[in-house]
Image (spheres, rainbow, N blue to C red):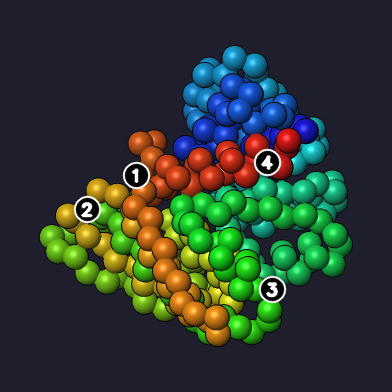
Amino acid sequence: MRISIIGCGAIGSAIARAIDKKIIPAKLAGIYDLDSSKINKLYSHLKTKPTISKNLRDAMKSCDLVVECASQNAVKEIFKLSCNLKKDIFVLTVGALIVHPEILKKAKKYNFKIYFPSGAIVGLDGINALNIEKNKIKSVTLTTTKPPKSLGFKKCIKRKVVFYGTAEEAVKKYPANINVCATLALSSIGAKRTKVQIVVDPKIKSNKHEIEVISDFGRFTTKTENVPSKENPRTSYLAILSAISALKQLCS
């Protein structure tokens, strides 16, 4: 499988290196980023040199699967082009699928595949099991607790709740660092019903995600405490590993 990576930040670069090391059994066809310095930095660390694409279309033309690691706006633009070029997409900025719900609707209508990994949470297998019987999940709540730096706070002296609302509202207010709630919502009861609480805590160094699911078949909770990526503290390192694992399975 030929893969093009859009976005050469922490996640995009890690995926590219995983392909380069043959952890992901695929060919890196192209890399693209609006920031040329990120492209050059990544390119210099790869043994097998991919094509440095001139633009988004150029990157997408040469591959079988487009891996998005950029932004919500990028997801929208990539999907528009994928409709013309007939390319499947692997999305990391999962919140875009909630902000732009037409993407999933059109993908289903025109039979395009959109993949996304489990990210920085666990327990989606249990939720998928509950989804076998419709309308059995009563509530889904995510509580995310992060250090100030992960949420963009320069000063914070005590633990406080900075957001409480739906997943739909959360991905709009925090487009770059709460994709985990979008993954949870899309896998369960939807963005309007999934509840999200975001907490900033200056005393912690890890990103914490707690999920509570209540259904007709019982209740379960999961808790993860993830080390932030050294390259991008807004991203849990588990989210990077999750993307690599999902692509490895997809390409095998």
Name the kind of residue labelled 1 in the image: Val
The span from disc 3 to disc 1 (Cα, nearest Å) is 33 Å
Cα distance between the residues tagged 4 and 3? 23 Å
Residue 105 lies, in percent from the top left, at 76, 69
Could you give the CA–CA distance between mark 2 and mark 1, rounded to whole angstroms? 10 Å
What residue is shown with label 1? 227
Please tell me whether residue 57 is drawn above or below residue 91 in the rendered image: above
- Three-letter amino acid code of the residue under disc 3: Ile
Q: How many residues crowd mark 3 within 10 Å: few (<14), some (14–19), many (20+)?
A: few
Give me the disc on residue 249: 4
Q: Amino acid at mark 4?
A: Gln
Residue at disc 3, secondary structure: loop
Camera-near label (4 vs 1) is 4
Q: Is residue 214 above or below residue 124?
A: below
Q: Position of residue 232 (x, y in %)?
A: 39, 41
Q: Position of residue 223 (x, y in %)?
A: 38, 60
Checking the image for residue 30, the label placed there is none
Which residue, as the protein is rendered here, is positioned at the far left? Answer: 157
Q: If you read the primary sequence from the N terminus, does the residue marked by circle 3 or circle 1 appear first?
A: 3
Q: Is 25 on the left-hand or right-hand side of 199?
A: right
Sooner in the amino-acid sequence: mark 2 or mark 3: 3
| First of labels 2, 1 by sequence position | 2
Q: Which residue is mark 3?
A: 132
Please state, as top left, top right, bottom left or bottom right, where the N terminus lies in the image: top right
